[in-house]
Image (tube, rainbow, N blue to C red):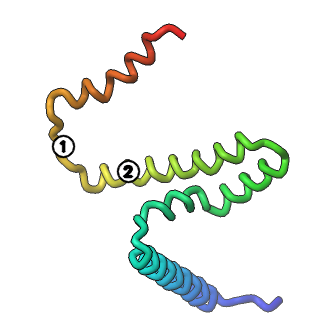
Amino acid sequence: MPPVSVFLALVQFLGGAALVIAATESLVKGLAGILRALRIACLSPARCCRGLEAENVAVGLAAGHAGLVEVALGTVDGGAIFMLTVALGLGVLVAPLKVQLPAPVPWLVSSPISASATCPR
């Protein structure tokens, strides 16, 4: 195989990245149009596609094939939860929002947690 120049490799990489971005943008716009036409909330298909990163799919398929259903589900859901928390964390670091909650809200949020911790089983 003949050596490839750095310039040519860079052009090929950037061309491929641009193609992937354009295709993804087109796919998302088309899907959003179909969902609007069918009057379906955009969140529904997004929830179905969670965890579809290549490494999560590979581990999930291997675990499912080995009969480790819990591992397969944990891989997909764990990946989605990780991506969500990292995105939220980076968003808070980049553009923090000032939030003021009414006085009873923290108590309402914490009461089920404390109730479940103190209830005998």
Q: Regarding mark 2 in the picture, which secondary structure is present there?
A: helix
Q: Indicate left or right for 29 with 80 as reference.
A: left
* Residue 49: quadrant of the picture: bottom right
Residue 114: x and y in percent read 38, 17
Name the residue located 43 percent from the left edge and 61 percent from the top edge. 43
Q: Position of residue 46 (x, y in %)?
A: 49, 62
- On screen, residue 71 versus residue 95, left or right, reads right
**Which residue is nearer to you in this view: 91 or 59?**
59
Q: Which residue is mark 1?
A: 99
Amino acid type of the residue tagged 1 in the rendering? Val
* Residue that mark 2 sits on: 88
Q: Nearer the viewer, residue 41 or 3?
A: 41
Q: Residue at x 15, y 28 (%)?
A: 103
Element at badge 1?
Answer: loop
Q: Is residue 16 above or below residue 111?
A: below
* Residue kind at label 2, given as amino acid type: Leu
Residue 25, image x, y percentages: 46, 80
Query: In the rendered view, would you say 31 is above or below 75?
Result: below
Q: In which quadrant of the rendered image does the C terminus lie?
A: top right
Residue 10 - label: none
- Horizontal side, residue 104 vs residue 10: left or right: left
Q: Quadrant of the N terminus?
A: bottom right
Q: Earlier in the sequence, mark 1 or mark 2?
A: 2
